[in-house]
Amino acid sequence: MSELRTTLVQADLRWEDPDANCRLLDEQLGDLDGDDTDLIVLPEMFATGFTMNSRAMAEPMERSSSVAWLREQAVKRRCVLTGSIAVIAEGEYYNRLIWATPDGELTHYDKRHLFRMAGEHERYGMGNERVVVELKGFRILLTVCYDLRFPVWLRQQPSSGEHFEYDALLCIANWPAPRRRPWRTLLQARAVENLCYVIGVNRVGEDAKKLAYAGDSMLVDFKGDPLIDEPRDTPFIRTGTLDREALSDFRDKFPAWMDADRFTLEV
């Protein structure tokens, strides 16, 4: 399995309305399924927009209608779906990325870096575990929005005897339009420095706080070159392909990883 078909879903989300957003996304996805793609990527907080109203919007995983919808979609469409929602677990609130597989299994990653300029660190708990999932032979590091600014957290940390920890970095976001240049720059920088693909999905539209989102969802290859790049602020769905052979060939021909600094990450 040398290719991974990945679908970027750039959506105009409804504010704090999970049912409306699930209907909107279901309609936007149309008849897209496992015949067309292996992975469908939704924006950060796809059910509510980037709300700090965690006390009202968060639900336990087992009772969350948004988690149930995500799982049902993965099973029905016969591919992986991923996006984040607000959840409550063991008395703490998290901005949690859910990875739902066609067999109904769920994996999750809790956002590590909380956007203090919006007060996210006061409304949600900080995750403390990096999560790498595997799909069709590709190892994928899961991240959310503000994580993208912190290269140490995202840096390749291969186990002993391995050269790479992951092959693609996935980042979902609600990244406002005034800071679109850092978003685009960092997506490409993370690809170059980690010799990996980067999948970046952002939302569009305006939220209840009058913040505008420009989208700029991108699929970037291991050289920092965009494979999908449509800098426009309207909804779209685009599918691109990650190529295992091309990635391996480049890593062999340009082995910058051999000169990388070794370090230990403390969380």
Image (cartoon, helix red, strand yellow):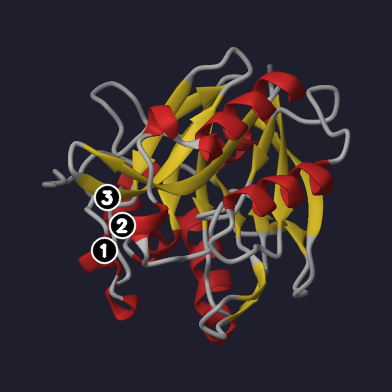
In the rendered structure, which disc, 1 or 2, sits on the residue that comes first in sequence? 2
Residue at x 53% of width, y 61% of height:
16
Q: Position of residue 101 (x, y in %)?
A: 58, 22
At label 3, the amino acid type is Tyr
Residue at the spot of label 3:
93
Expressed as whole percent of the image width and height from the top left, the position of residue 156 reads 35, 43
* Residue placed under numbered mark 1 in the picture: 123
Q: Can residue 21 be spotted in the picture?
A: yes
Amino acid type at image mark 1? Arg
Residue that label 2 marks: 55
Where the N terminus falls, by quadrant?
Answer: top right
3D distance between C-alphas at marks 1 and 2? 8 Å
Find numbered disc 2 in the image and state the secondary structure of the residue it sits on: helix
The image shows residue 134, relative to residue 27, as above or below, that is above
Residue 157 to residue 107: above or below: below
**Left or right position of 145 against 14:** left
Q: Nearer the viewer, mark 3 or mark 2?
A: 2
Q: CA distance from mark 3 to mark 1?
A: 7 Å
Q: How many numbered badges does the structure rendering display?
A: 3
Circle 1/circle 2 CB separation < 8 Å:
yes
Query: Which residue is outermost to the top?
Result: 103
Q: Residues within 10 Å of mark 2 (few under 14, many from 20)?
A: some
156 sits to left or right of 141: left
Quadrant housing residue 151: bottom left
Q: Secondary structure at mark 1?
A: helix
Query: What SS does tag 3 mark?
Result: strand
In the rendered image, the residue lying farthest to the right is 31
Q: Disc 3, disc 2: CB below 8 Å?
A: yes
Q: Nearer the viewer, residue 179 or 165?
A: 179
Of label 3 and label 1, which has the lower sequence position?
Answer: 3
Question: Is the residue under label 1 in contact with that under label 3 (CB below 8 Å)?
Answer: yes
First-in-chain label (3 vs 2) = 2
